[in-house]
Amino acid sequence: MRSSRNAAMFISLMAVSGFTVLVKGAIGMHPMHHFLFLSLLALALLTSRWKVRLPGLTGNMSVNVPFLFLAIVQLSLFEAAVIAFASTLVQSLPQRGKPLKVVQVLFNASTVTTAAGFAYLVLRNPASRPGSNGSLPLALAAGTFFLVNTLPVATIIALTEGAKFIRTWSSILHLSFPYYVAGTGITSLITGKGGHIGWALPLATLPVMLGIYRSYRIYFGEAALAGSTGPNAPFTAVEKSRAVGAS
């Protein structure tokens, strides 16, 4: 009973946090980058449904991270938060015939929106911009996004399922971190020296993301057939994390 109450409080905290990011972004909103915003929103929504089922797990992950990072780098806080919230909402929607778990969807969307908000603030913090090196701020922002996105997932699993927090989070790290590194690299290549990109440029990443999506499907499909022993053993600890919202 106590763990359920704590879990409910934590989910409420994440919901408030995500809502706060949206409100903060709306209050301090700059003029919208209409075409780039709509382009990144459409691409994030599309790729959020390119989901890979992990071996032996009930959850999945999508390949929309580079478009979330591009939104954080190129757009206002409000625009980036809207794209994060909307794409995660679409990603969390169940397949036809399966029930909608409202609390799960709320937790997922709020967590990713909060992660986007923190990453946005880190990216624009003068302390993260020593000299003229533009790669370091992006790396720090991507690392912040990863931590703020995955730590709450490990926390909610510990609260609801009694799983070991460190073990669960290390499993999420094992699965997700290489993809976040790839997403950071793609974002860095597109943004170059930090100039404003055109609305059509992100379209060029679609073939790359499709290739990554197909590679993940093939790899995890083979891993599922081989079972979850040996190098794949840590995957089993991520099952519930993917069910509640790591993206």
Image (tube, rainbow, N blue to C red):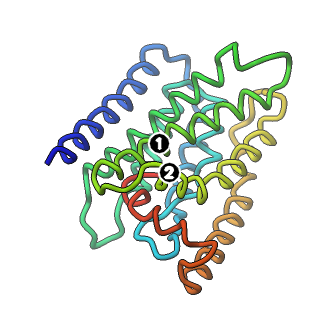
Query: Where does residue 135 sit, x and y in percent of width and height?
Result: 79, 31
Query: Where does residue 213 sit, x and y in percent of width and height?
Result: 64, 66
Q: Nearer the viewer, residue 108 or 205?
A: 108
The residue under label 1 is which amino acid type? Leu
Judge whether 102 appears above or below 145 on screen.
below
Q: Residue at x 84, y 29 (%)?
A: 193
Query: Where does residue 199 sit, x and y in percent of width and height?
Result: 68, 39
- Who comes first in sequence, dot 2 or dot 1? 1
Judge whether 154 appears above or below 208 on screen.
above
Q: Residue at x 47, y 76 (%)?
A: 56
Local secondary structure at mark 1: helix
The residue under label 2 is which amino acid type? Trp
Identify the mark at residue 169; answer none if there is no mark.
2
Q: Does 244 sit left or right of 6 as displayed?
A: right
Local secondary structure at mark 2: helix
Q: Nearer the viewer, residue 37 or 224?
A: 224
Q: Does 26 sit left or right of 225 as displayed?
A: left
Q: Does 115 sit left or right of 132 as displayed?
A: left
Distance from Cα at disc 2 to Cα at disc 1: 7 Å
Mark 2, Cα crowd under 10 Å, few <14 / some 14-19 / many 20+, is: many
Evaluate if marks 2 and 1 touch, with contact meaning CB atoms under 8 Å apart.
Answer: yes
The residue that disc 1 covers is 151
